[in-house]
Image (cartoon, rainbow, N blue to C red):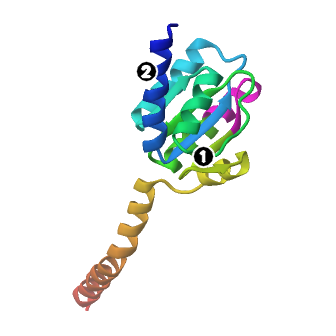
Amino acid sequence: MTKQEKVEIVEFLKAEFSNSSAIVVCDYKGIKTKQLEDLRNKSRDLNVKVQVIKNKLAKIAMNEAGLPENQLKDTNIFIWGEDQIALSKVVCKFAQDSKENFSLKFGYFDKELVDVNHIEAISKLPSKDELIGMLLSVWTAPARYFVTGLDNLRKQKEEQ
Protein backbone atom coordinates (compact mmCIF):
# COMPACT_ATOMS: atom_id res chain seq x y z
CA MET A 1 0.00 0.00 0.00
CA THR A 2 1.45 3.34 -1.02
CA LYS A 3 1.68 6.35 1.25
CA GLN A 4 -0.99 8.16 -0.81
CA GLU A 5 -3.41 5.24 -0.39
CA LYS A 6 -2.81 5.27 3.36
CA VAL A 7 -3.49 9.02 3.52
CA GLU A 8 -6.75 8.54 1.57
CA ILE A 9 -7.84 5.72 3.89
CA VAL A 10 -7.10 7.81 6.98
CA GLU A 11 -9.06 10.77 5.55
CA PHE A 12 -12.01 8.53 4.70
CA LEU A 13 -11.99 6.93 8.16
CA LYS A 14 -11.64 10.30 9.87
CA ALA A 15 -14.74 11.56 8.07
CA GLU A 16 -16.68 8.36 8.81
CA PHE A 17 -15.70 8.28 12.49
CA SER A 18 -16.48 11.98 12.92
CA ASN A 19 -19.98 11.58 11.45
CA SER A 20 -20.96 8.37 13.26
CA SER A 21 -22.55 8.33 16.68
CA ALA A 22 -21.49 4.76 17.47
CA ILE A 23 -18.28 2.84 16.84
CA VAL A 24 -17.56 -0.64 18.19
CA VAL A 25 -14.18 -2.36 18.02
CA CYS A 26 -14.21 -6.16 18.11
CA ASP A 27 -11.70 -9.00 17.95
CA TYR A 28 -12.44 -11.30 15.03
CA LYS A 29 -9.61 -13.83 15.32
CA GLY A 30 -10.78 -17.19 13.99
CA ILE A 31 -13.86 -15.92 12.15
CA LYS A 32 -14.43 -17.48 8.75
CA THR A 33 -14.93 -15.27 5.72
CA LYS A 34 -18.50 -16.51 5.24
CA GLN A 35 -19.39 -15.47 8.81
CA LEU A 36 -17.81 -12.06 8.25
CA GLU A 37 -19.86 -11.63 5.07
CA ASP A 38 -23.02 -12.52 7.03
CA LEU A 39 -22.16 -9.77 9.53
CA ARG A 40 -21.58 -7.29 6.70
CA ASN A 41 -24.89 -8.20 5.03
CA LYS A 42 -26.89 -7.87 8.26
CA SER A 43 -25.15 -4.59 9.00
CA ARG A 44 -25.69 -3.17 5.53
CA ASP A 45 -29.47 -3.52 5.96
CA LEU A 46 -29.27 -1.29 9.06
CA ASN A 47 -26.89 1.25 7.50
CA VAL A 48 -24.02 0.04 9.68
CA LYS A 49 -20.53 -0.22 8.20
CA VAL A 50 -18.08 -3.03 8.91
CA GLN A 51 -14.40 -2.88 8.00
CA VAL A 52 -11.13 -4.49 8.97
CA ILE A 53 -8.58 -1.70 9.36
CA LYS A 54 -4.89 -1.75 10.16
CA ASN A 55 -4.39 -0.67 13.75
CA LYS A 56 -1.94 2.11 12.92
CA LEU A 57 -4.25 3.67 10.32
CA ALA A 58 -7.26 3.32 12.60
CA LYS A 59 -5.40 4.93 15.49
CA ILE A 60 -4.42 7.92 13.35
CA ALA A 61 -7.99 8.33 12.05
CA MET A 62 -9.46 8.05 15.55
CA ASN A 63 -7.05 10.65 16.91
CA GLU A 64 -7.84 13.04 14.06
CA ALA A 65 -11.59 12.47 14.61
CA GLY A 66 -11.20 13.53 18.25
CA LEU A 67 -11.97 10.16 19.83
CA PRO A 68 -10.39 9.29 23.20
CA GLU A 69 -7.30 7.17 22.84
CA ASN A 70 -7.43 3.45 23.50
CA GLN A 71 -5.16 0.48 22.90
CA LEU A 72 -5.53 -1.29 19.57
CA LYS A 73 -3.92 -4.70 19.69
CA ASP A 74 -4.23 -7.93 17.74
CA THR A 75 -6.91 -8.30 15.07
CA ASN A 76 -9.59 -5.62 15.09
CA ILE A 77 -12.73 -5.09 13.09
CA PHE A 78 -14.44 -1.71 13.26
CA ILE A 79 -18.21 -1.43 13.10
CA TRP A 80 -19.82 2.01 12.98
CA GLY A 81 -23.07 3.77 12.21
CA GLU A 82 -25.61 6.36 13.29
CA ASP A 83 -28.05 4.20 15.26
CA GLN A 84 -26.41 3.10 18.51
CA ILE A 85 -29.14 0.61 19.38
CA ALA A 86 -29.20 -1.09 15.98
CA LEU A 87 -25.42 -1.30 15.90
CA SER A 88 -25.30 -2.74 19.43
CA LYS A 89 -27.98 -5.31 18.61
CA VAL A 90 -26.18 -6.50 15.47
CA VAL A 91 -22.79 -6.74 17.17
CA CYS A 92 -24.05 -8.48 20.33
CA LYS A 93 -26.18 -10.94 18.36
CA PHE A 94 -23.24 -11.79 16.11
CA ALA A 95 -20.92 -12.15 19.12
CA GLN A 96 -23.44 -14.47 20.79
CA ASP A 97 -23.77 -16.59 17.64
CA SER A 98 -20.01 -16.75 17.03
CA LYS A 99 -19.15 -17.64 20.64
CA GLU A 100 -15.37 -17.78 21.08
CA ASN A 101 -14.22 -16.44 17.69
CA PHE A 102 -15.70 -12.94 17.97
CA SER A 103 -15.59 -10.70 21.01
CA LEU A 104 -16.34 -7.08 21.77
CA LYS A 105 -13.43 -4.97 23.00
CA PHE A 106 -14.74 -1.42 23.46
CA GLY A 107 -16.68 1.26 21.67
CA TYR A 108 -17.40 4.95 21.30
CA PHE A 109 -20.93 6.26 21.72
CA ASP A 110 -21.29 9.98 21.00
CA LYS A 111 -17.48 10.20 20.99
CA GLU A 112 -17.30 8.86 24.57
CA LEU A 113 -15.38 5.67 25.35
CA VAL A 114 -17.68 2.83 26.51
CA ASP A 115 -16.99 -0.68 27.68
CA VAL A 116 -18.50 -4.02 26.68
CA ASN A 117 -21.12 -3.93 29.45
CA HIS A 118 -22.45 -0.60 28.19
CA ILE A 119 -22.70 -1.92 24.62
CA GLU A 120 -24.56 -5.03 25.82
CA ALA A 121 -26.93 -2.89 27.90
CA ILE A 122 -27.72 -0.69 24.90
CA SER A 123 -28.39 -3.79 22.78
CA LYS A 124 -31.21 -4.79 25.13
CA LEU A 125 -33.11 -1.52 24.60
CA PRO A 126 -36.04 -1.51 22.16
CA SER A 127 -35.26 -0.24 18.67
CA LYS A 128 -36.67 2.96 17.22
CA ASP A 129 -39.40 1.04 15.34
CA GLU A 130 -40.35 -0.90 18.49
CA LEU A 131 -40.58 2.35 20.47
CA ILE A 132 -42.79 3.92 17.81
CA GLY A 133 -45.04 0.85 17.92
CA MET A 134 -45.30 1.09 21.70
CA LEU A 135 -46.12 4.79 21.51
CA LEU A 136 -48.80 4.24 18.86
CA SER A 137 -50.30 1.47 20.97
CA VAL A 138 -50.53 3.80 23.96
CA TRP A 139 -51.99 6.61 21.86
CA THR A 140 -54.66 4.42 20.26
CA ALA A 141 -55.66 2.63 23.49
CA PRO A 142 -58.35 5.16 24.55
CA ALA A 143 -59.98 5.02 21.11
CA ARG A 144 -59.86 1.19 21.13
CA TYR A 145 -61.44 1.04 24.58
CA PHE A 146 -64.11 3.55 23.56
CA VAL A 147 -65.00 1.56 20.42
CA THR A 148 -65.02 -1.71 22.41
CA GLY A 149 -67.33 -0.11 24.98
CA LEU A 150 -69.70 1.12 22.27
CA ASP A 151 -69.71 -2.32 20.65
CA ASN A 152 -70.50 -3.97 23.98
CA LEU A 153 -73.28 -1.44 24.58
CA ARG A 154 -74.71 -2.17 21.10
CA LYS A 155 -74.64 -5.94 21.79
CA GLN A 156 -76.35 -5.39 25.14
CA LYS A 157 -79.11 -3.29 23.53
CA GLU A 158 -79.64 -5.91 20.81
CA GLU A 159 -80.08 -8.65 23.44
CA GLN A 160 -82.79 -6.65 25.22
Above or below residue 77? Residue 127 is: below
The circle drawn on residue 108 is 1
Is disc 1 surrounded by few (<14), some (14 to 19) or many (20+) residues within 10 Å? many
Q: Residue at x 44, y 45 (%)?
A: 82
**Where's residue 19, x and y in %?**
42, 43
Q: Is 147 on the left-hand or right-hand side of 79? A: left
Q: Nearer the viewer, mark 2 or mark 1?
A: 2
Going 34% across and 75% down the picture, which residue do you hit?
A: 139
Picture coordinates of residue 11, whole percent (x, y)? 44, 28
Considering only vertical position in the picture, is 82 above or below 52?
below
Residue range (magenta): 94-105
- Which of pointers 2 and 1 lies earlier in the amino acid sequence? 2
Report the residue that reaches farthest toward the top: 1
Q: Report helix, strand or loop for mark 1.
A: strand
Residue 96 in magenta stretch: yes
Front-most of 40 and 139? 40
- Using a 10 Å C-alpha cutoff, classify the residue at mark 2 as few (fewer than 14 neighbours), some (14 to 19) or many (20 or more): few
Q: Secondary structure at mark 2?
A: helix
Which residue corresponds to the image point at 28% horizontal and 88% vertical from the top-left?
A: 153
Residue at the right extreme?
Answer: 100
Q: Quadrant of residue 147?
A: bottom left
Q: CA distance from mark 2 to mark 1?
A: 23 Å
In the image, residue 146 above or below residue 3: below
Q: Which residue matches tag 2?
A: 8
